[in-house]
Image (tube, rainbow, N blue to C red):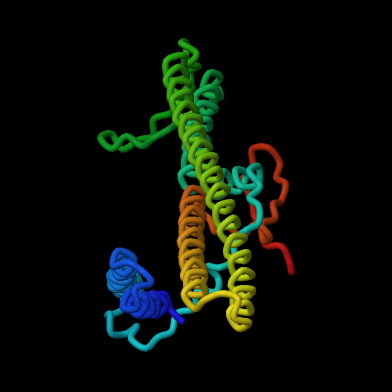
Amino acid sequence: MGRRDLQGETVRILELQKAAGEVSAYDVTQARVALNNGRLAAIEAFRASEDARTRLAAALGLPRKALEGVKISYDRFGRLEPDIPVADTRRHALLNRSDILASLSEYAACESALRLEIAKQYPDIRIGPNYQLDQTDSKWMIGLALDLPILSRNKGPIAEAEARRAESAARFLGLQSQVIGELDAAVAACRSALQKSKAADDLLADLAKQESTAGARYSAGEISRLELLGIQIELNSSALAGLEALVRAQESVGRLENAMQSPLDVKDWFFVKTPEGSGPEKERKDD
């Protein structure tokens, strides 16, 4: 029985009790307010569901009618990672985030430019024959070709290259600090949301046991129908709170995945140790 049905049955019983003088009009009014709030919440939930389907269709590049009659499974969203390893999460992000890799590539380019300018301090000295055809006199001119060393030892370009490398290094370190901060905050928020979801699940399991016991007591005539309905409404409210906690947890997981720029699928992470200075590699572990 849904929540609105439970609240409607509660109102019906309270009205009968009021007619018999057993409860006050205030009790009936409070039950009616709860029923009306439940109806409004159901309308809002339907609107949110339709809006979500519309946005899903837009994200898929499909018209809204294409999703009519399509049953969407949410089973995957009911499963959450039991624990999130901070060190592996950070490593995975630093090896896969596009902005980190782009910044590292920029720094590598600045480093290569500096090495080239340093190499130019000692240019190759080549002495060899030099000849060309004089177009005016129509005869060959012969001389010597000589590359002279740079007397300034290329200090100016080297200093500029060093400055560019230092600037690139500062940008990278700033970006890395920002990324690590985002990851740490996302992991903390994700863990908190997972704990709340687990607590909501535990409470729901406890209320389910109480509802089962209350059903047996009602069958035995120990409690009234109204008391049983109260427990069932509480169980329904707890289930809704648990669902909301699960949604918050999945949203926090989504924010963490955005910070990592990678799905949070820890069991499939496998890192290959690479020598210093080489590019990162990632392989999928065989199941």
Q: Is residue 123 left or right of residue 27?
A: right
Depth order, front residue of 158/26: 26
| The C terminus - image quarter | bottom right
Q: In percent of the image, x 52 and y 69: which residue is there?
A: 231
Task: Pinpoint residue 159: horizontal percent, then vertical percent.
Answer: 45, 17
Depth order, front residue of 20/261: 20
Q: Quadrant of residue 17?
A: bottom left
Q: In percent of the image, x 72 and y 62: which residue is there?
A: 285
Depth order, front residue of 105/176: 176
| In the rendered image, the vertical position of residue 179 relative to residue 167, given as above or below | below
Task: Pinpoint residue 195: horizontal percent, then vertical percent.
Answer: 59, 51
| In the rendered image, the vertical position of residue 176 relative to residue 166, given as above or below | below
Task: Pinpoint residue 28: horizontal percent, then vertical percent.
Answer: 31, 70
Q: Quadrant of residue 200?
A: bottom right
Q: Is residue 94 left or right of residue 271?
A: left
Outermost front residue: 21
| In the rendered image, the vertical position of residue 279 relative to residue 127, given as above or below | below
Q: In percent of the image, x 51 and y 55: which residue is there?
A: 253
Task: Pinpoint residue 246: horizontal percent, then vertical percent.
Answer: 51, 61
| In the rendered image, the vertical position of residue 91 relative to residue 49, given as above or below | above
Q: Is residue 41 left or right of residue 116?
A: left
Residue 44 visible in the current orientation: no
Q: Quadrant of residue 132?
A: top left
Depth order, front residue of 216/224: 224
